[in-house]
Amino acid sequence: MTKRVLLIVGGGIAAYKASELVRLLKKAGHSVRCVMTEAAHHFVTPMTLAALSEDKVYTTLWDLKDEAEMGHIQLSRQADLIVVAPATADLLAKMAAGIADDLATTLLLATDTPVHTFPAMNVRMWRHPATSRNIAQLRADGVTVHDPDEGAMACGEYGPGRLPEPTAILAAIEAHFAAPSPASAQSIGRLSGRHILVTAGPTHEPIDPVRYLANRSSGKQGFAIAGALAAFGARVTLVAGPVTLATPAGVDRIDVQTAREMAEMVEKSLPADAAVMVAAVADWRAEAPLDQKIKKAAGGTPTLHLTENPDILVTLATSPHRPRLLIGFAAETEDVIPHATSKRTRKNVDWIVANDVSGPPGQSVMGGDANTVHLVTDTGVESWSRMDKTMVATALAARIADALDA
Ligand code: CTP
Protein backbone atom coordinates (compact mmCIF):
# COMPACT_ATOMS: atom_id res chain seq x y z
CA MET A 1 0.00 0.00 0.00
CA THR A 2 1.39 3.35 -1.01
CA LYS A 3 2.13 5.75 1.82
CA ARG A 4 3.47 9.28 1.88
CA VAL A 5 6.68 9.63 3.85
CA LEU A 6 8.18 12.98 4.77
CA LEU A 7 11.88 12.36 5.33
CA ILE A 8 13.78 14.92 7.38
CA VAL A 9 17.52 14.56 6.84
CA GLY A 10 19.70 15.89 9.66
CA GLY A 11 23.29 17.00 9.32
CA GLY A 12 25.49 14.07 10.26
CA ILE A 13 27.91 11.84 8.39
CA ALA A 14 25.18 9.17 8.21
CA ALA A 15 23.14 11.51 5.98
CA TYR A 16 24.65 9.65 3.02
CA LYS A 17 22.42 6.69 3.95
CA ALA A 18 19.35 8.91 3.40
CA SER A 19 19.79 8.60 -0.36
CA GLU A 20 19.60 4.81 -0.19
CA LEU A 21 16.60 5.05 2.14
CA VAL A 22 14.77 7.25 -0.36
CA ARG A 23 15.56 4.75 -3.12
CA LEU A 24 14.26 1.82 -1.03
CA LEU A 25 11.10 3.67 0.00
CA LYS A 26 10.36 4.51 -3.64
CA LYS A 27 11.08 0.92 -4.67
CA ALA A 28 8.61 -0.25 -1.99
CA GLY A 29 5.98 1.90 -3.70
CA HIS A 30 5.84 4.83 -1.29
CA SER A 31 6.02 8.50 -2.17
CA VAL A 32 8.82 10.41 -0.46
CA ARG A 33 9.28 14.10 0.05
CA CYS A 34 12.54 15.30 1.61
CA VAL A 35 13.33 18.16 3.95
CA MET A 36 16.97 18.89 4.73
CA THR A 37 18.45 20.87 7.60
CA GLU A 38 21.08 23.46 6.80
CA ALA A 39 23.79 21.15 8.19
CA ALA A 40 22.62 18.22 6.05
CA HIS A 41 23.73 20.13 2.94
CA HIS A 42 27.33 19.47 3.98
CA PHE A 43 26.83 15.71 3.69
CA VAL A 44 24.33 15.14 0.87
CA THR A 45 23.12 17.39 -1.91
CA PRO A 46 19.48 18.43 -2.45
CA MET A 47 19.98 17.43 -6.08
CA THR A 48 20.63 13.77 -5.12
CA LEU A 49 17.55 13.57 -2.91
CA ALA A 50 15.40 15.41 -5.47
CA ALA A 51 16.47 12.99 -8.21
CA LEU A 52 15.84 9.91 -6.08
CA SER A 53 12.55 11.13 -4.59
CA GLU A 54 11.41 12.56 -7.94
CA ASP A 55 10.16 15.58 -6.02
CA LYS A 56 11.31 18.98 -4.88
CA VAL A 57 13.50 19.01 -1.77
CA TYR A 58 12.51 21.53 0.89
CA THR A 59 15.29 23.25 2.71
CA THR A 60 14.26 26.63 4.06
CA LEU A 61 11.46 28.20 6.00
CA TRP A 62 12.05 31.54 4.29
CA ASP A 63 11.36 30.48 0.75
CA LEU A 64 8.25 32.62 0.22
CA LYS A 65 7.39 30.78 -2.93
CA ASP A 66 7.20 27.54 -0.95
CA GLU A 67 5.04 29.15 1.69
CA ALA A 68 2.65 30.27 -1.01
CA GLU A 69 2.69 26.89 -2.73
CA MET A 70 3.04 24.62 0.23
CA GLY A 71 3.26 25.95 3.77
CA HIS A 72 5.13 23.95 6.36
CA ILE A 73 1.83 22.95 7.94
CA GLN A 74 0.65 21.32 4.71
CA LEU A 75 4.02 19.67 4.22
CA SER A 76 3.54 17.64 7.37
CA ARG A 77 -0.24 17.23 6.97
CA GLN A 78 0.24 15.67 3.58
CA ALA A 79 2.40 12.90 5.07
CA ASP A 80 1.31 9.60 6.62
CA LEU A 81 4.58 9.40 8.52
CA ILE A 82 7.48 11.72 9.29
CA VAL A 83 10.85 10.01 9.46
CA VAL A 84 13.90 11.81 10.84
CA ALA A 85 17.06 10.05 9.62
CA PRO A 86 19.71 10.69 10.66
CA ALA A 87 18.42 12.44 13.77
CA THR A 88 21.42 14.30 15.18
CA ALA A 89 21.86 15.07 18.89
CA ASP A 90 21.16 18.72 18.06
CA LEU A 91 17.95 17.97 16.17
CA LEU A 92 16.69 15.67 18.96
CA ALA A 93 17.48 18.35 21.56
CA LYS A 94 15.55 20.97 19.59
CA MET A 95 12.60 18.61 19.17
CA ALA A 96 12.59 17.78 22.90
CA ALA A 97 12.68 21.48 23.79
CA GLY A 98 10.09 22.50 21.22
CA ILE A 99 12.47 24.82 19.39
CA ALA A 100 11.34 25.81 15.91
CA ASP A 101 14.12 27.77 14.22
CA ASP A 102 14.25 26.22 10.76
CA LEU A 103 11.95 24.37 8.38
CA ALA A 104 12.62 20.89 9.84
CA THR A 105 12.07 21.85 13.48
CA THR A 106 9.10 24.08 12.66
CA LEU A 107 7.21 21.38 10.87
CA LEU A 108 8.10 18.84 13.59
CA LEU A 109 6.53 21.19 16.14
CA ALA A 110 3.55 21.92 13.94
CA THR A 111 2.61 18.32 13.18
CA ASP A 112 0.33 15.70 14.63
CA THR A 113 1.48 13.09 12.11
CA PRO A 114 3.38 10.14 13.72
CA VAL A 115 7.13 10.79 13.91
CA HIS A 116 9.84 8.11 13.85
CA THR A 117 13.38 9.25 14.60
CA PHE A 118 16.55 7.30 13.88
CA PRO A 119 19.35 8.87 15.96
CA ALA A 120 22.95 8.76 14.73
CA MET A 121 25.84 10.37 16.53
CA ASN A 122 29.15 9.80 18.25
CA VAL A 123 28.93 7.23 21.06
CA ARG A 124 29.79 9.79 23.76
CA MET A 125 27.10 12.14 22.50
CA TRP A 126 24.63 9.22 22.51
CA ARG A 127 25.57 8.31 26.09
CA HIS A 128 25.55 11.91 27.35
CA PRO A 129 22.90 12.48 30.04
CA ALA A 130 21.53 15.44 28.04
CA THR A 131 20.81 13.16 25.05
CA SER A 132 19.26 10.51 27.34
CA ARG A 133 17.02 13.20 28.88
CA ASN A 134 15.97 14.46 25.44
CA ILE A 135 15.17 10.96 24.25
CA ALA A 136 13.14 10.19 27.37
CA GLN A 137 11.23 13.45 26.81
CA LEU A 138 10.57 12.68 23.15
CA ARG A 139 9.33 9.18 23.99
CA ALA A 140 7.05 10.67 26.65
CA ASP A 141 5.76 13.07 23.97
CA GLY A 142 4.81 10.12 21.76
CA VAL A 143 7.72 10.32 19.31
CA THR A 144 9.13 6.92 18.31
CA VAL A 145 12.88 6.95 18.91
CA HIS A 146 14.66 3.93 17.45
CA ASP A 147 17.87 2.83 19.08
CA PRO A 148 20.99 3.28 16.96
CA ASP A 149 23.13 0.33 15.89
CA GLU A 150 26.36 -0.51 17.62
CA GLY A 151 29.65 -0.70 15.73
CA ALA A 152 32.66 1.14 14.38
CA MET A 153 31.93 4.83 13.86
CA ALA A 154 33.15 7.30 11.26
CA CYS A 155 34.95 9.16 14.07
CA GLY A 156 37.07 6.08 14.82
CA GLU A 157 35.28 5.11 18.05
CA TYR A 158 33.20 2.01 18.71
CA GLY A 159 29.79 1.70 20.34
CA PRO A 160 26.12 2.60 19.90
CA GLY A 161 25.41 5.59 17.67
CA ARG A 162 25.43 4.27 14.11
CA LEU A 163 22.42 4.87 11.90
CA PRO A 164 20.82 1.47 11.15
CA GLU A 165 21.15 0.26 7.59
CA PRO A 166 18.50 1.66 5.22
CA THR A 167 16.92 -1.84 4.86
CA ALA A 168 16.42 -1.92 8.64
CA ILE A 169 14.91 1.58 8.64
CA LEU A 170 12.58 0.53 5.84
CA ALA A 171 11.52 -2.54 7.87
CA ALA A 172 10.70 -0.30 10.86
CA ILE A 173 8.69 2.03 8.60
CA GLU A 174 6.80 -0.91 7.09
CA ALA A 175 6.14 -2.23 10.61
CA HIS A 176 4.60 1.13 11.48
CA PHE A 177 2.37 1.03 8.41
CA ALA A 178 1.42 -2.61 9.01
CA ALA A 179 0.33 -1.98 12.61
CA PRO A 180 -3.35 -2.82 12.82
CA SER A 181 -4.51 0.59 14.02
CA PRO A 182 -7.62 2.37 12.79
CA ALA A 183 -5.26 4.21 10.41
CA SER A 184 -4.22 0.99 8.68
CA ALA A 185 -7.40 -0.99 8.87
CA GLN A 186 -6.45 -2.77 5.63
CA SER A 187 -4.38 -5.21 7.75
CA ILE A 188 -7.50 -6.48 9.50
CA GLY A 189 -8.77 -9.64 7.86
CA ARG A 190 -5.66 -10.25 5.76
CA LEU A 191 -5.23 -13.64 7.46
CA SER A 192 -8.88 -14.60 7.80
CA GLY A 193 -9.51 -18.25 6.99
CA ARG A 194 -5.92 -19.19 7.95
CA HIS A 195 -4.98 -21.35 10.92
CA ILE A 196 -1.63 -20.47 12.47
CA LEU A 197 0.12 -22.31 15.24
CA VAL A 198 2.41 -20.44 17.63
CA THR A 199 4.56 -21.79 20.46
CA ALA A 200 5.79 -19.43 23.15
CA GLY A 201 7.55 -19.22 26.49
CA PRO A 202 9.99 -21.57 28.17
CA THR A 203 9.36 -25.16 29.14
CA HIS A 204 9.83 -26.46 32.67
CA GLU A 205 11.46 -29.85 32.98
CA PRO A 206 10.89 -31.38 36.42
CA ILE A 207 13.73 -32.68 38.56
CA ASP A 208 11.52 -33.52 41.52
CA PRO A 209 8.09 -32.21 42.64
CA VAL A 210 9.52 -28.79 43.63
CA ARG A 211 12.48 -28.24 41.29
CA TYR A 212 12.76 -27.87 37.54
CA LEU A 213 15.10 -26.92 34.68
CA ALA A 214 14.05 -23.75 32.83
CA ASN A 215 15.31 -20.71 30.94
CA ARG A 216 14.64 -16.96 31.07
CA SER A 217 12.09 -16.81 28.23
CA SER A 218 9.16 -14.57 29.22
CA GLY A 219 6.86 -15.55 26.34
CA LYS A 220 6.35 -11.86 25.45
CA GLN A 221 7.54 -12.16 21.83
CA GLY A 222 5.48 -15.30 21.11
CA PHE A 223 2.36 -13.88 22.78
CA ALA A 224 2.76 -10.64 20.79
CA ILE A 225 3.03 -12.66 17.56
CA ALA A 226 -0.06 -14.71 18.42
CA GLY A 227 -1.93 -11.46 19.17
CA ALA A 228 -0.80 -9.77 15.95
CA LEU A 229 -1.79 -12.80 13.84
CA ALA A 230 -5.23 -12.86 15.50
CA ALA A 231 -5.56 -9.10 14.88
CA PHE A 232 -4.89 -9.84 11.19
CA GLY A 233 -7.85 -12.25 11.28
CA ALA A 234 -6.10 -15.65 11.62
CA ARG A 235 -7.39 -18.47 13.81
CA VAL A 236 -4.46 -18.78 16.19
CA THR A 237 -3.57 -21.72 18.42
CA LEU A 238 -0.99 -20.71 20.99
CA VAL A 239 0.79 -23.54 22.78
CA ALA A 240 2.31 -21.77 25.75
CA GLY A 241 4.88 -22.89 28.27
CA PRO A 242 4.59 -21.68 31.86
CA VAL A 243 4.33 -17.86 31.75
CA THR A 244 2.24 -15.31 33.57
CA LEU A 245 0.97 -13.38 30.52
CA ALA A 246 -2.64 -12.65 29.64
CA THR A 247 -4.01 -14.45 26.57
CA PRO A 248 -4.13 -12.04 23.59
CA ALA A 249 -7.61 -11.28 22.24
CA GLY A 250 -8.98 -13.91 19.87
CA VAL A 251 -6.27 -16.50 20.56
CA ASP A 252 -6.93 -20.17 21.54
CA ARG A 253 -4.39 -20.97 24.23
CA ILE A 254 -3.18 -24.39 25.38
CA ASP A 255 -0.95 -24.35 28.46
CA VAL A 256 1.82 -26.90 28.84
CA GLN A 257 4.76 -27.39 31.18
CA THR A 258 7.28 -29.62 29.46
CA ALA A 259 8.80 -29.98 25.99
CA ARG A 260 7.13 -33.34 25.52
CA GLU A 261 3.71 -31.88 26.40
CA MET A 262 4.38 -29.01 23.99
CA ALA A 263 5.31 -31.49 21.24
CA GLU A 264 2.09 -33.44 21.83
CA MET A 265 -0.12 -30.33 21.74
CA VAL A 266 1.58 -29.00 18.60
CA GLU A 267 0.94 -32.35 16.88
CA LYS A 268 -2.71 -32.31 18.02
CA SER A 269 -3.22 -28.75 16.73
CA LEU A 270 -2.32 -29.61 13.13
CA PRO A 271 -3.07 -28.98 10.33
CA ALA A 272 -2.05 -25.33 10.12
CA ASP A 273 -1.25 -23.00 7.23
CA ALA A 274 1.75 -21.62 9.09
CA ALA A 275 3.58 -22.27 12.34
CA VAL A 276 5.75 -19.82 14.25
CA MET A 277 7.84 -21.66 16.81
CA VAL A 278 8.91 -18.96 19.22
CA ALA A 279 9.17 -21.11 22.36
CA ALA A 280 12.54 -21.48 24.02
CA VAL A 281 12.11 -25.22 24.42
CA ALA A 282 14.45 -26.85 26.92
CA ASP A 283 16.89 -28.98 24.95
CA TRP A 284 17.28 -31.45 27.81
CA ARG A 285 15.21 -32.87 30.64
CA ALA A 286 16.08 -34.84 33.73
CA GLU A 287 16.31 -38.47 32.68
CA ALA A 288 14.47 -39.75 35.75
CA PRO A 289 12.55 -37.06 37.65
CA LEU A 290 11.89 -38.14 41.21
CA ASP A 291 8.42 -38.47 42.76
CA GLN A 292 9.63 -37.16 46.10
CA LYS A 293 11.70 -34.09 46.91
CA ILE A 294 15.42 -34.85 46.89
CA LYS A 295 16.62 -34.46 50.48
CA LYS A 296 19.98 -33.07 51.47
CA ALA A 297 20.20 -35.79 54.05
CA ALA A 298 20.32 -38.36 51.23
CA GLY A 299 24.04 -37.79 51.26
CA GLY A 300 26.41 -35.86 48.98
CA THR A 301 25.56 -33.63 46.03
CA PRO A 302 23.09 -35.28 43.67
CA THR A 303 24.11 -35.86 40.05
CA LEU A 304 21.62 -34.81 37.42
CA HIS A 305 21.44 -37.13 34.41
CA LEU A 306 19.97 -35.38 31.38
CA THR A 307 18.40 -36.72 28.24
CA GLU A 308 17.54 -34.86 25.05
CA ASN A 309 14.04 -33.53 24.44
CA PRO A 310 12.30 -34.00 21.09
CA ASP A 311 12.96 -31.11 18.70
CA ILE A 312 9.42 -29.95 18.00
CA LEU A 313 10.44 -27.79 15.05
CA VAL A 314 12.37 -30.59 13.33
CA THR A 315 9.47 -33.00 13.95
CA LEU A 316 7.10 -30.50 12.36
CA ALA A 317 9.42 -29.94 9.38
CA THR A 318 9.38 -33.65 8.56
CA SER A 319 5.70 -34.24 9.37
CA PRO A 320 3.25 -35.15 6.58
CA HIS A 321 1.22 -32.23 7.97
CA ARG A 322 4.09 -29.75 7.67
CA PRO A 323 2.57 -26.24 7.52
CA ARG A 324 3.14 -24.48 4.20
CA LEU A 325 5.11 -21.77 5.99
CA LEU A 326 7.28 -22.99 8.85
CA ILE A 327 9.08 -20.36 10.90
CA GLY A 328 11.59 -21.03 13.65
CA PHE A 329 13.27 -18.66 16.04
CA ALA A 330 16.96 -18.77 16.83
CA ALA A 331 18.12 -17.66 20.25
CA GLU A 332 21.85 -17.00 19.90
CA THR A 333 24.50 -15.39 22.07
CA GLU A 334 27.25 -15.15 19.43
CA ASP A 335 27.63 -15.28 15.62
CA VAL A 336 23.89 -14.69 15.43
CA ILE A 337 23.45 -14.61 11.65
CA PRO A 338 25.78 -17.53 10.73
CA HIS A 339 24.22 -19.75 13.42
CA ALA A 340 20.70 -18.78 12.38
CA THR A 341 21.46 -19.37 8.71
CA SER A 342 22.78 -22.85 9.36
CA LYS A 343 19.86 -23.55 11.73
CA ARG A 344 17.46 -22.73 8.89
CA THR A 345 18.99 -25.35 6.62
CA ARG A 346 19.60 -27.90 9.35
CA LYS A 347 16.03 -27.73 10.65
CA ASN A 348 14.56 -27.52 7.13
CA VAL A 349 12.37 -24.49 7.89
CA ASP A 350 11.34 -21.64 5.59
CA TRP A 351 12.32 -18.71 7.77
CA ILE A 352 14.36 -18.23 10.90
CA VAL A 353 13.85 -15.17 13.04
CA ALA A 354 17.17 -14.73 14.79
CA ASN A 355 17.70 -12.74 17.93
CA ASP A 356 20.71 -12.05 20.10
CA VAL A 357 19.80 -13.16 23.61
CA SER A 358 23.14 -12.35 25.22
CA GLY A 359 23.37 -9.88 28.06
CA PRO A 360 22.80 -10.00 31.79
CA PRO A 361 19.37 -10.85 33.23
CA GLY A 362 17.18 -7.76 33.10
CA GLN A 363 19.00 -6.31 30.09
CA SER A 364 18.72 -9.22 27.68
CA VAL A 365 16.10 -9.63 24.96
CA MET A 366 14.82 -12.53 27.08
CA GLY A 367 12.32 -10.93 29.43
CA GLY A 368 12.66 -7.45 27.88
CA ASP A 369 10.11 -5.49 25.82
CA ALA A 370 12.26 -4.77 22.76
CA ASN A 371 13.98 -7.00 20.25
CA THR A 372 16.44 -6.69 17.38
CA VAL A 373 15.77 -9.47 14.92
CA HIS A 374 17.21 -10.74 11.65
CA LEU A 375 14.83 -12.46 9.28
CA VAL A 376 16.66 -15.27 7.48
CA THR A 377 14.86 -16.58 4.39
CA ASP A 378 15.89 -18.40 1.22
CA THR A 379 16.58 -15.02 -0.38
CA GLY A 380 18.95 -13.73 2.30
CA VAL A 381 19.03 -11.91 5.62
CA GLU A 382 17.05 -8.81 6.54
CA SER A 383 18.15 -7.04 9.71
CA TRP A 384 15.35 -5.09 11.35
CA SER A 385 16.11 -2.19 13.65
CA ARG A 386 15.47 -2.53 17.37
CA MET A 387 11.74 -2.37 17.97
CA ASP A 388 9.18 -3.06 20.61
CA LYS A 389 8.25 -6.78 20.57
CA THR A 390 4.70 -5.86 19.53
CA MET A 391 6.11 -4.01 16.48
CA VAL A 392 8.26 -7.02 15.58
CA ALA A 393 5.10 -9.14 15.88
CA THR A 394 3.09 -6.88 13.59
CA ALA A 395 5.86 -6.69 11.00
CA LEU A 396 6.19 -10.48 11.03
CA ALA A 397 2.41 -10.95 10.77
CA ALA A 398 2.43 -8.69 7.71
CA ARG A 399 5.22 -10.75 6.14
CA ILE A 400 3.35 -13.99 6.91
CA ALA A 401 0.21 -12.56 5.27
CA ASP A 402 2.27 -11.65 2.17
CA ALA A 403 3.83 -15.14 2.01
CA LEU A 404 0.52 -16.98 2.40
CA ASP A 405 -1.07 -14.76 -0.26
CA ALA A 406 1.72 -15.48 -2.73
N1 CTP B 1 12.93 -25.84 19.13
C1 CTP B 1 11.96 -26.82 19.23
N2 CTP B 1 12.20 -27.91 20.05
C2 CTP B 1 13.35 -28.02 20.73
C3 CTP B 1 14.34 -27.01 20.63
C4 CTP B 1 14.09 -25.93 19.82
O1 CTP B 1 10.92 -26.72 18.60
N3 CTP B 1 13.54 -29.06 21.49
C5 CTP B 1 12.69 -24.71 18.23
C6 CTP B 1 12.53 -23.37 18.91
O2 CTP B 1 11.16 -23.11 19.21
C7 CTP B 1 13.06 -22.42 17.84
C8 CTP B 1 14.12 -23.24 17.13
O3 CTP B 1 13.82 -24.59 17.41
O4 CTP B 1 12.06 -22.10 16.90
C9 CTP B 1 15.53 -22.95 17.51
O5 CTP B 1 15.69 -22.99 18.90
P1 CTP B 1 17.10 -22.65 19.56
O6 CTP B 1 16.98 -22.85 21.04
O7 CTP B 1 17.61 -21.35 19.04
O8 CTP B 1 18.03 -23.74 18.91
P2 CTP B 1 18.37 -25.20 19.29
O9 CTP B 1 17.65 -26.11 18.37
O10 CTP B 1 18.13 -25.43 20.74
O11 CTP B 1 19.91 -25.26 18.91
P3 CTP B 1 21.17 -24.72 19.75
O12 CTP B 1 20.93 -25.10 21.18
O13 CTP B 1 22.30 -25.44 19.11
O14 CTP B 1 21.26 -23.23 19.52
Image (cartoon, rainbow, N blue to C red):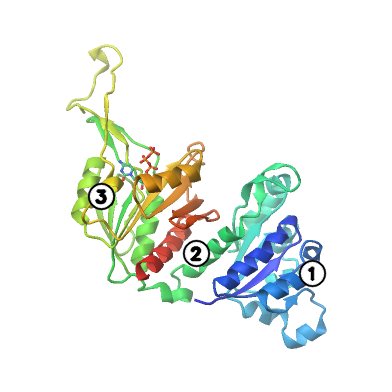
| Mark 1: C-beta under 8 Å from nearest atom of ligand 1 | no
**Which residue type does callout 2 highlight?**
Ala
Do we see residue 218 in this rendering?
no
Nearer the viewer's eye, disc 3 or disc 2? 3
Residue 250 in picture, x, y percent from top left: 30, 65
235 left or right of 331?
left
User: What residue does disc 3 label?
Assistant: 318
**Mark 3: which secondary structure?**
loop
Q: Which residue lies at the image location 49% right of the left edge and 51% below the top edge?
A: 373
Mark 1 surroundings: few (<14), some (14-19) or many (≥20) residues within 10 A: few
Q: Which badge, 2 or 1, comes first in the chain's sequence? A: 1
Whether residue 274 is situated above or below residue 52 in the rendered picture:
above
User: Which numbered dot is residue 101?
Assistant: 1
User: Which numbered dot is residue 175?
Assistant: 2
Q: Which residue lies at the image location 73% right of the left edge and 68% below the top edge?
A: 105
Do we see residue 299 in this rendering?
yes
